[in-house]
């Protein structure tokens, strides 16, 4: 069965065969075993795609509920639209990029897909694991951990059975952050919001210039090898007419967790016991402490406070597992292991798969 | 809410306003509660109705003959009455189970087909996936939809689709698909 046959079957399923053409097809279908097999194949492919897209749509519907529920009185709350509408569908734990939070810091791309542009100095690009993938944090032979261990020795067992977690393992960050990028002509590293839905992103090209559209806002992306602010495009560009090509850009979302700042307002203590993980907060003369109780090693504990839309949300990343600390209770509460299928703020801790964006060529 | 604009956007693949339809959720939930359902059942039913609505708009089965709220309520009523009927017939009060069966794609074989076809689709380029999905899921008609799919003419969209479909077809076989049936 050739290409023409497949096209005919496609037309048959799309109800585009009429009159004599339809009658001929049906007659042949009744007699021709090969055609019957081809019809079966296309029918199954269509069913499979329908199942995939149905599942994707159902997941998006759930996300829209989250988005609606987090938008209190008006539909146009740009600060809230971003994180709640991210795609949870089919998120796979793969390598992501890690970008140091310094204006001119070198970018690091994940996996094996380092930028190959010879103009990019290789010493600016390094591969880093996402913290949540690095499930054996304690075994890492890194100077940071060695340093942490040294600090730990000084602080440990300072208070009968309680170990003070080194300050550099207690972080604070804001989400979302201002968008920054680096671009080498093939790969875009995007920093600031790892939850932007893929469906709300497009790439346009006009002559030699590239533009990134995010949630309907257009940004020009120049060949910046170092992290640069993503500025709204102020010129005029006619997006009414463009052609989608098979060429693609790879967009990698930067981890915003690793470069977080130290939280100097929170002390974290660990009580190592064989019990189910619990926590509580202490407040001594204005100094706030979080006490974590569980069978954990102190060097594997990291605590993050995330400032988001006026709220503070606390998470503990322990040996690669993420726990939510739901409130600042001063009585013992169970630590809640994060289920990443939920569409909430915890997803900023999950490595996000890179996406491929087809290049849309603008027609002048 | 501008319903016409929302529908036009949806028909062009833009779902950015769909979340606004949750404004109709309380009406549905209240209706379900009045009809011997729980709040949770009402919320689940609303999500199912929204799913059906979006799918129907995208596939051209919804023509905006009625207001969206009326359409959503119609879907909910049909589904709710059907579930009540099913429950009576099966002497079971467990609505949740019925819903789960529907959501789980009716069994392991179909899940296998989904995974299999997903793998096949991943072997195509992004633009091919977009075209094949538009044709198979959204019932794209080249003469009408070529522009929104990024092509300059229906002919070029059709030709590109033909290439993509050949690639997809070439990576599978009757025996492999039959084994999943």
Image (spheres, rainbow, N blue to C red):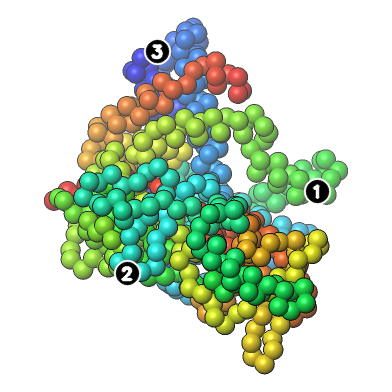
Q: Residue at x 36, y 36 (%)?
A: B125
> Along the horizontal axis of the image, is A38 left or right of B105?
left
Q: Disc 2 marks which residue? A: A103
Residue under disc 2 on the same chain as residue under disc 3: yes
Residue A111 vertical position relative to residue B121 in the rendered view, above or below? below
The crowd level at tag 2 (other Cα within 10 Å; few <14, some 14-19, many 20+) is: few
Q: Disc 1 marks which residue? A: B94
The chain holding disc 2 is A
Q: Nearer the viewer, residue B158 or A149?
A: A149
Q: Residue at x 50, y 46 (%)?
A: A94
> Along the horizontal axis of the image, is B83 left or right of A221?
right
Q: Residue at x 69, y 66 (%)?
A: B30
Q: Disc 3 marks which residue? A: A1
Instruction: Evaluate if marks 1 and 3 touch, with contact meaning CB atoms under 8 Å apart.
Output: no
Disc on the earlier residue, 2 or 3: 3
Could you tell me if residue B113 is visible in this image? yes
Residue under disc 2 on the same chain as residue under disc 1: no
- The CA distance from mark 1 to mark 3 is 48 Å
State which quarter of the image contains the N terminus of chain A: top left
Residue under disc 1 on the same chain as residue under disc 3: no
Could you tell me residue B74's position as x and y percent? 60, 53
Q: Nearer the viewer, mark 2 or mark 3?
A: 2
- The CA distance from mark 2 to mark 1 is 57 Å
- Where disc 2 sits, the SS reads loop
- Where disc 3 sits, the SS reads loop
- The CA distance from mark 2 to mark 3 is 58 Å
Q: Nearer the viewer, residue B24 or A350?
A: A350
């Amino acid at each position: 069965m050739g290409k023409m046959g497949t096209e005919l079957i496609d037309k048959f399923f799309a109800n585009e065969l009429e009159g004599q053409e339809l009658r001929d097809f049906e007659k042949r279908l009744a007699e021709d075993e090969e055609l019957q097999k081809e019809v079966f194949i296309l029918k199954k492919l269509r069913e499979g795609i329908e199942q995939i897209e149905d599942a994707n749509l159902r997941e998006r519907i759930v996300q829209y509920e989250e988005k609606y529920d987090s938008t209190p009185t008006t539909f146009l709350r740009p600060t809230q639209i971003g994180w709640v509408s991210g795609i949870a569908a089919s998120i796979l734990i793969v390598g992501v990029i890690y970008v140091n939070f310094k204006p001119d810091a070198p970018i690091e791309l994940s996996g094996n897909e380092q930028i190959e542009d010879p103009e990019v100095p290789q010493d600016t690009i390094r591969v880093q694991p996402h913290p949540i993938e690095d499930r054996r944090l304690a075994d890492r032979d890194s100077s940071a951990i060695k340093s942490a261990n040294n600090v730990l020795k000084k602080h440990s067992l300072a208070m009968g059975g309680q170990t003070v977690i080194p300050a550099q393992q207690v972080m604070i960050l804001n989400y979302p952050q201002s968008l920054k990028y680096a671009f080498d002509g093939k790969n875009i590293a995007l920093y600031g919001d790892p939850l932007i839905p893929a469906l709300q992103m497009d790439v346009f090209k006009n002559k030699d210039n590239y533009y990134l559209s995010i949630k309907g806002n257009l940004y020009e992306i120049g060949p910046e090898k170092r992290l640069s602010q993503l500025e709204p495009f102020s010129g005029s560009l006619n997006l009414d007419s463009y052609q989608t090509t098979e060429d693609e850009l790879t967009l990698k979302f930067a981890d915003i967790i690793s470069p977080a700042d130290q939280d100097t307002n929170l002390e974290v203590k660990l009580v190592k016991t064989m019990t189910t993980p619990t926590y509580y907060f202490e407040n001594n003369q204005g100094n706030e402490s979080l006490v974590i109780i569980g069978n954990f090693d102190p060097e594997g504990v990291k605590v993050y406070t995330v400032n988001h839309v006026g709220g503070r949300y606390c998470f503990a990343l322990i040996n690669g597992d993420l726990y939510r600390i739901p409130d600042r209770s001063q009585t013992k509460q169970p630590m809640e292991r994060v289920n990443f299928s939920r569409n909430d703020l915890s997803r900023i801790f999950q490595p996000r798969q890179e996406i491929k964006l087809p290049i849309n060529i603008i027609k002048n | 809410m501008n319903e016409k604009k929302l529908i036009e956007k949806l028909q062009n693949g833009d779902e950015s306003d769909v979340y606004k339809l949750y404004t109709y959720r309380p009406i549905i939930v209240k209706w379900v509660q009045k009809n011997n359902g729980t709040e949770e059942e009402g919320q689940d039913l609303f999500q199912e109705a929204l799913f059906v609505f979006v799918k129907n708009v995208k596939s051209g089965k919804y023509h905006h003959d009625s207001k969206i709220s009326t359409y959503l309520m119609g879907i909910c009523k049909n589904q709710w009455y059907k579930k009540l009927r099913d429950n009576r017939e099966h002497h079971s009060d467990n609505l949740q189970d019925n819903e789960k069966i529907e959501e789980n794609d009716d069994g392991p074989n179909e899940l296998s087909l989904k995974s299999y076809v997903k793998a096949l689709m991943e072997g195509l380029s992004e633009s091919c996936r977009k075209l094949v999905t538009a044709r198979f899921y959204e019932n794209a008609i080249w003469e009408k939809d070529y522009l929104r799919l990024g092509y300059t003419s229906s002919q070029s969209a059709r030709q590109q689709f033909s290439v993509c479909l050949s690639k997809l077809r070439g990576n599978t076989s009757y025996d492999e698909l039959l084994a999943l049936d």
